């Protein structure tokens, strides 16, 4: 598991080694445990409360989408 970004010192985006398709990241912290598709940027599982935090996370992923997809692929080759 690799933390790729932290939000508000409580939440983090994680890539996990040998994970399954579709390409995704895990957004965890507090009572949140969500899975976000790296291609569509849609929440696949779990829930992130609509509002500032959700927008912040999705904006960060959109800005870093290409790099995150490369990192996901690299993690799966372990």
Image: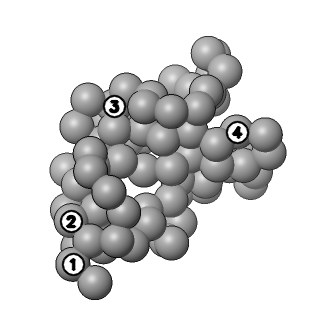
User: Tag 1 or tag 3, which sits nearer the N-term?
Assistant: 3
Residue 32 horizontal side relative to residue 74, left or right: right
Q: Secondary structure at mark 2?
A: helix
Q: Whole-Å distance between the Cαs marked 3 and 4? A: 17 Å
Q: What residue is disc 3 on?
A: 41
Nearer to the camera, 54 or 20 = 20
What percent of the width, then of the height, locates residue 32? 70, 39
Q: Earlier in the sequence, mark 3 or mark 4?
A: 4
Q: Kindly check if marks 1 and 2 are in contact, taking CB atoms under 8 A apart as contact.
A: yes
The residue where tag 1 is placed is 77
The residue labelled by disc 4 is 32
Classify 10 Å Cα crowding around label 4: few (below 14), some (14-19), many (20 and above): some
Q: Which residue is mark 2?
A: 73
Q: Earlier in the sequence, mark 4 or mark 1?
A: 4
Find numbered disc 3 in the image and state the secondary structure of the residue it sits on: loop
State which tag comes first along the sequence, 2 or 4.
4
Identify the image's colour scheme: rainbow, by chain, secondary structure or one colour. one colour
Give the image location of residue 68, x and y in percent: 29, 55
The disc placed on residue 44 is none
Marks 2 and 3: CB-CB under 8 Å? Answer: no
Cβ–Cβ under 8 Å for marks 3 and 1: no
Q: Earlier in the sequence, mark 2 or mark 3?
A: 3
Whole-number angstrom distance, CA of label 2 to CA of label 4: 25 Å
């Amino acid at each position: 598991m690799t933390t790729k970004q932290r939000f508000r010192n409580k939440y983090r985006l994680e890539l996990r080694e040998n994970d399954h398709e579709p390409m995704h990241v895990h957004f965890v912290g507090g009572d949140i445990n969500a899975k976000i598709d790296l291609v569509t940027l849609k929440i696949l599982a779990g829930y992130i409360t609509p509002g500032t935090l959700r927008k912040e996370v999705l904006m960060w992923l959109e800005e870093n989408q290409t790099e995150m997809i490369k990192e996901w692929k690299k993690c799966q080759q372990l």
